[in-house]
Image: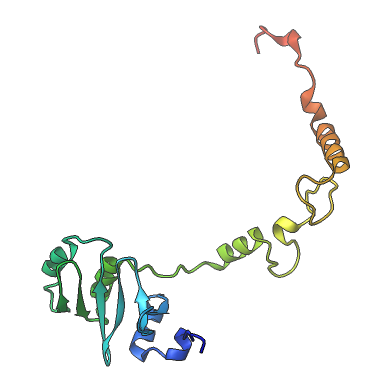
Amino acid sequence: MAHETKSVNQVMPSAVLQQFARKYRLQLRLHHEDGEPIILGKRGHVYEYGEGVLAFLFLPGSASRQWGHLVGKLTAPAFRVVQDCDAEGAAIFDHNDGETVKMVLKICRIHAKRLLSPERLAALKFRFGKPVGGGDTGPQSTVGDLGGVKGQSRRGTAKSRVSGVATARALLAPSLSPPDLSKIGQPR
């Protein structure tokens, strides 16, 4: 029997976790052990603790006293510690309070997905060769080509290299003329 993996869409995360992720532009993933939907960060994750209640689990990379310092900061009424260990722990938080959420995202090092402006998105699509509304398609374009074939490597053939060098010399010839030495030392 083959091992089946479930996607986030097959597990159906709770409405609260989905709304939270959508509101703060976060990505839902499945936990690797139990398949529960979580919002993963570098030092922990956010998960649904109970119906309509969110919690975060703090897991530092190495055994340190970071959790002990955090417990002192989590005395606000928006937090309630539910698991307290030496180097890691979990706490319930008020997901409707913006300041609390900001603190949780910082503690777990969870970063929001970037939103691109339409101009930046068009520039990136042009840069990576995806057509945007027709016309020139970026790096694969023949605009500015020195006689090569579209899609050809930059080196090309020996003939295209020679013709490219000749074209470049022809374009630069006026600027390569010897300097006029008669004007040296004269006032302007």
Q: Residue at position x 47%, y 84% from top? A: 5
Residue 179 as seen in the image, left or right of residue 116: right
Q: Is residue 151 above or below residue 54?
A: above
Rendered location of residue 7, percent (x, y): 47, 84
Which quarter of the rendering shows the C terminus?
Answer: top right
Rendered location of residue 168, percent (x, y): 80, 36
Question: Residue furthest toward the front?
Answer: 1
Q: Residue at position x 13%, y 74% from top? A: 76
Please tell me which residue lies in front, 178 or 62.
62
Please tell me which residue lies in front, 123 or 146.
146
Q: Is residue 25 above or below residue 176?
A: below
Residue 21 as seen in the image, left or right of residue 77: right
Residue 95 as seen in the image, left or right of residue 71: right
Please tell me which residue lies in front, 90 or 25.
90
Rendered location of residue 35, percent (x, y): 38, 84
Rendered location of residue 82, percent (x, y): 16, 81
Question: Residue furthest toward the top?
Answer: 185
